[in-house]
Image: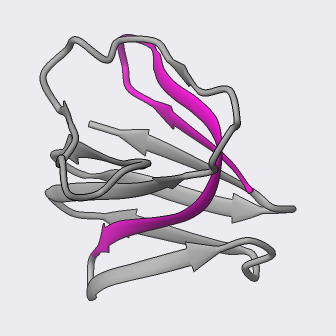
Amino acid sequence: MYLEIVTPEAVVFRAQVDAVKVPGHDGEFQMLNNHAPIVSTLTEGEVKINLTSGSENEIKRKDQEGFRTESSEANVLYYTIKGGVLEMKDNKAIILAD
């Protein structure tokens, strides 16, 4: 599926991903390929992104605060948000993050 993370300043991330886990209002939830359409508000926390192996990722501002990786998890990226909104439709997820 395709994931885009947009902040008020810029589009900070665009890529094909295998999965994304987000901090929803009622707890964390994960979306995989072909997830049913959903719109959800997000709370403060981390977005966990499982990158698709071999795909080209467009991380606009990886050097900014918010992105991190862990050495034990190859192809996993974390992005910290203060809140926002998520829309998943037609195998495309868009996170409008604060």
Locate residue 47 relative to residue 6 in the image: left or right: left
Specify start and end residues of the magenta stretch as a single range.
1-24
**Residue at the extreme right:** 90
Residue 19, placed above or below residue 66:
below
Residue at point 74%, 71% (across, down): 33
Residue 41: quadrant of the picture: bottom left
- Colour theme: one colour
Image coordinates of residue 94 in percent, x first then y, are: 60, 46
Residue at point 70%, 36% (across, down): 55
Name the foreground residue: 5 vs 41: 5
Image coordinates of residue 48 in percent, x first then y, are: 34, 58
Image coordinates of residue 49 in percent, x first then y, are: 43, 54
Residue 10: quadrant of the picture: top left
Please name the predominant secondary structure of the magenta segment in the image.
Answer: strand
Locate residue 71 relative to residue 17 in the image: left or right: left
Look at the image and say whether residue 5 sits in the magenta stretch. Answer: yes
For the N terminus, the quadrant is: bottom right
